[in-house]
Image (tube, grey):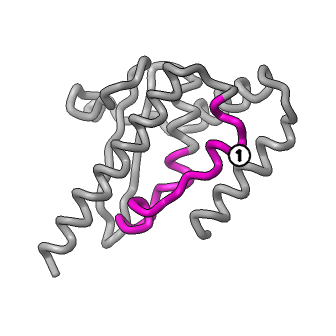
Amino acid sequence: MSLNKVQDQIVDEFSLLGDDRESTIFYIMELGQKLPALAEEHMTEQNLIKGCQSKVWLTADLDGNRINFKADSNTDITKGLISLLIRVLDGRTPDEILSAELTFIEKIGMGGIIGSQRSNGLTAMIKQMKLYALAYKTKLAQKA
């Protein structure tokens, strides 16, 4: 499924919640609870995303020319936020990730749902995922 189609699905899901902030936050928390737990050995300082108020661990592996992300957090809301990013960016090529415009964030009104601290954390998560994409793009180019 295309990156934009996944984003459209997310926007549709959140539109069902209307403008009910409490329901939206609860839904984000539910999404986080569905994210598979990250293995304990990956919850290291090296995998910790800097700039997040909560702890967020992110790993990335290259499978062929596609990047698979796994993540975990110590809070349900943050875990829900990273699960949305993984849903959109997981299994994509480095170029797809690097050029991705994550329009769903604005379309679902995320800025009004989460505070500025979590917004900064969300930006840090996106930045880290794009850094992994850049690193794997470089690695793939060296192999070619």
Instruction: Report which quarter residue 113 is drawn in.
Output: top right
Instruction: Report which quarter residue 40 is drawn in.
Output: top left
Residue beneath the point at 56% across and 35% down: 81
Q: In the picture provided, is 41 more to the left or to the right than 77?
A: left
Residue type at the position of mark 1: Lys
Q: In the picture provided, is 66 more to the left or to the right than 11?
A: left
Q: Residue furthest bottom?
A: 144
Secondary structure category for the residue under label 1 = helix
By secondary structure, the bulk of the magenta-drawn segment is best described as helix
The percent coordinates of residue 7 (x first, y second) are 65, 55
Nearest the eye: 75 or 95: 95
Residue 47 lies in the magenta stretch: no
The percent coordinates of residue 90 (x first, y second) are 47, 56
Nearest the eye: 64 or 54: 54
Residue, disc 1: 107
Residue 89 lies in the magenta stretch: yes
The percent coordinates of residue 32 (x first, y second) are 58, 32
Q: Residue furthest left?
A: 142
Q: Where are the magenta residues, as a range?
A: 85-111
